[in-house]
Amino acid sequence: MPELPEVETIARELRPLVVGQIITDAWFDWPNQIKHPAPSAFAGAVRGREIVSVERRAKWLIFSLGPALATGEPAVLAIQVKMTGQLDVVPRDAPRDKHVHVVLGLDDGRELRLRDTRKFGRVALYTAHEADAVLGALGPEPLGEAFSLREFRRLLRARRARLKTLLMDQAFLAGVGNIYADEALWRARLHPLRTADSLSEAEVRRLHRAVRSVLRQGIANRGSSISDYVGADGEPGDNAEQLAVYRRTGEPCLRCGREIARIVIGQRSTHFCPRCQREPLSAGEPSR
Ligand SMILES: [Zn+2]
């Protein structure tokens, strides 16, 4: 499942390929992937709009679109690639295999294609107001300026959730999933079952720094080549070898040599070092 660094990588790679293009037509063969508006209205609503920018918000790719001729209103095209989605920009006559389920024609003769073997990816066209409502329900961007140590401390206060669960909660913090939650907790030396309200000031500071550094490192390495994820250019990311704990069960901790352990929290595999990230004995475990 691509997380913030992988989606950021896709946005950066797509931007120079599609910004300035006008969407000439839309095609899809799996209506469930069109989340909004009704699939029957999608092609008409997206046609004729210019792609003004490509950004990322949480795990969504956000294409700002210029006004439609009919209404004069701009729009936002939001695409979530989920587990197996891949976005390619190719010439219109390039062979299209059976896993291509959404195609947007571009006015220079190329196409933006969503290829998605498991069809979990979602495409939505929103008005600016609708986009604000949907995206506004997400937590802050961990690499954004507004996500200061002070703000993180405020968000954590009085939260009794387990750290692993909380970091993956998109309404709490946007863009962090299983991989980067495990990595950040290892880097901050915090057990994934610790509760947010048990953290000392020093631990809050370590976690804030760790979340931001693992995400920055992921972006610098063009994302992780976990699962079926590949970048927009078809090449897997380079970050998988850089991961310290994720899917390293039984391998030595890079810090202390102890074997990395795996537990399941909220149905998600969780990887940690039992020595560096000590189990919470009680709510009042002293920090080290
Ligand atoms: Zn360790």
Image: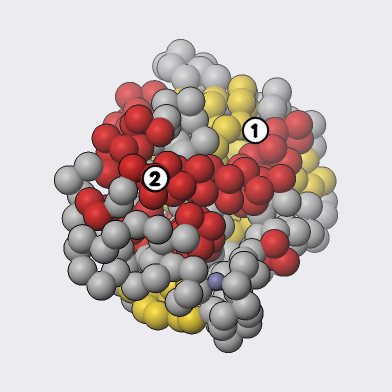
As helix, strand or loop, the secondary structure at mark 1 comes to strand
Q: Nearer the viewer, residue 95 or 77?
A: 77
**Disc number at residue 15?**
none
Q: Position of residue 241 (x, y in %)?
A: 72, 66
Question: Mark 1: few, some, or many residues within 10 Å (few <14, many ≥20)?
Answer: some
| Amino acid at the residue labelled 1 | Thr
Which mark is on residue 24?
1
Look at 21% across and 69% down and name the residue there. Answer: 282
Indicate if the residue with disc 1 has its beta carbon within 8 Å of ligand 1: no
Q: Amino acid at mark 2?
A: Ala
Q: How is the image coloured?
A: secondary structure
Direction from residue 276 to residue 256 in the image, left or right: right
Q: Position of residue 141 (x, y in %)?
A: 45, 36
The residue lying at 82 percent from left, 46 percent from top is 91
Residue situated in front as seen by the camera: 181 or 129: 181
| Of the pair 48 and 248, the residue shown nearer to us | 248
Give the class, few, some or many, for how many residues have Cα within 10 Å of label 2's Cα (few <14, many ≥20).
Answer: few
Whether residue 154 is visible to the viewer of this picture, yes or no, is: yes
Q: CA distance from mark 1 to mark 2?
A: 54 Å
Rendered residue at 61%/32% (across/down): 54
Quarter the C terminus occupies: bottom left
Ligand 1 sits in quadrant:
bottom right
Query: Can you identify the residue that label 2 sits on?
Result: 202
- Left or right: where 229 falls relative to 123: right
Instruction: Examine the rendered structure and indicate whether residue 101 appears above or below residue 267.
Output: above
Q: Are marks 1 and 2 in contact (CB under 8 Å)?
A: no
Residue 259 lies, in percent from the top left, at 56, 83
Regarding mark 2 in the picture, which secondary structure is present there?
helix
Q: Earlier in the sequence, mark 1 or mark 2?
A: 1
